[in-house]
Image (cartoon, helix red, strand yellow):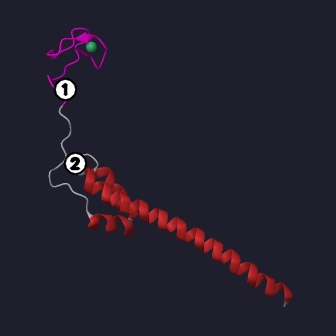
């Protein structure tokens, strides 16, 4: 027994159309999106995403239907790139604060 995804009416298993609302569906429901068999995680696109996070993000969004693994590699590269740049800017700020406090101390005493 299955139910109409549109109106929730109970239907026969082999029904192709809902008698309640006219919703059409195939015997097995809508065909699931099949990923391209050539899809595979790609280190190259990961590196590309790392150096060009915007490109990695776009590839991730464009490929998430047909090449989810390859797109995920590109997206992961972009994500790592963003994390690394955030960490680096935090380290940079900390170093600058330490440097400025030391330098500022000398400056005041001078
Ligand atoms: Zn229905």
Residue furthest top as drawn: 20
Seen in the picture, residue 32 relative to 14 is either above or below; the reply is: below
Mark 1 element type: loop
Mark 2 element type: loop
The disc placed on residue 66 is: 2
Q: Residue at x 59, y 74 (%)?
A: 92
Q: Is residue 106 left or right of residue 79?
A: right
The disc placed on residue 103 is: none
Crowding near the residue tagged with mark 2, few <14, some 14–19, many ≥20 C-alpha atoms within 10 Å: some
Q: Is residue 81 left or right of residue 34?
A: right
Seen in the picture, residue 43 relative to 68 is either above or below; the reply is: below
Q: Residue at x 25, y 45 (%)?
A: 65
Seen in the picture, residue 14 relative to 104 is either above or below; the reply is: above
Residue furthest right as drawn: 109
Q: Residue at x 16, y 14 (%)?
A: 15
Image coordinates of residue 39 in percent, x first then y, are 19, 54
Ligand 1 position by quadrant: top left
Range of magenta residues = 1-30
Residue furthest bottom as drawn: 110
Crowding near the residue tagged with mark 1, few <14, some 14–19, many ≥20 C-alpha atoms within 10 Å: few
Image coordinates of residue 90 in percent, x first then y, are 59, 68
Q: Quadrant of residue 25?
A: top left
User: Which residue bears the numbered disc 1?
Assistant: 29
Q: Residue at x 37, y 56 (%)?
A: 57
Q: Contact, CB < 8 Å: mark 2 with mark 1?
A: no
Mark 2–mark 1 distance (CA, rounded to whole Å): 20 Å
User: Residue 15 lies in magenta, yes or no?
Assistant: yes
Image coordinates of residue 78 in percent, x first then y, are 39, 61
């Amino acid at each position: 027994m299955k139910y109409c995804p549109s109106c929730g009416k109970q239907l026969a298993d082999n029904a192709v159309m809902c008698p309640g609302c006219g919703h059409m569906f195939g015997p097995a429901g809508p065909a699931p999106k099949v990923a391209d068999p050539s899809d595979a995680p790609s280190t190259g696109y990961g590196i590309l995403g790392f150096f060009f996070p915007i490109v990695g993000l776009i590839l991730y969004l464009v490929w998430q239907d047909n090449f989810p693994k390859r797109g995920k590699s590109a997206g992961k590269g972009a994500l790592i790139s963003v994390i690394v740049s955030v960490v680096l800017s935090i380290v940079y700020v900390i170093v600058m604060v330490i440097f400025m406090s030391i330098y500022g101390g000398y400056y005041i005493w001078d």
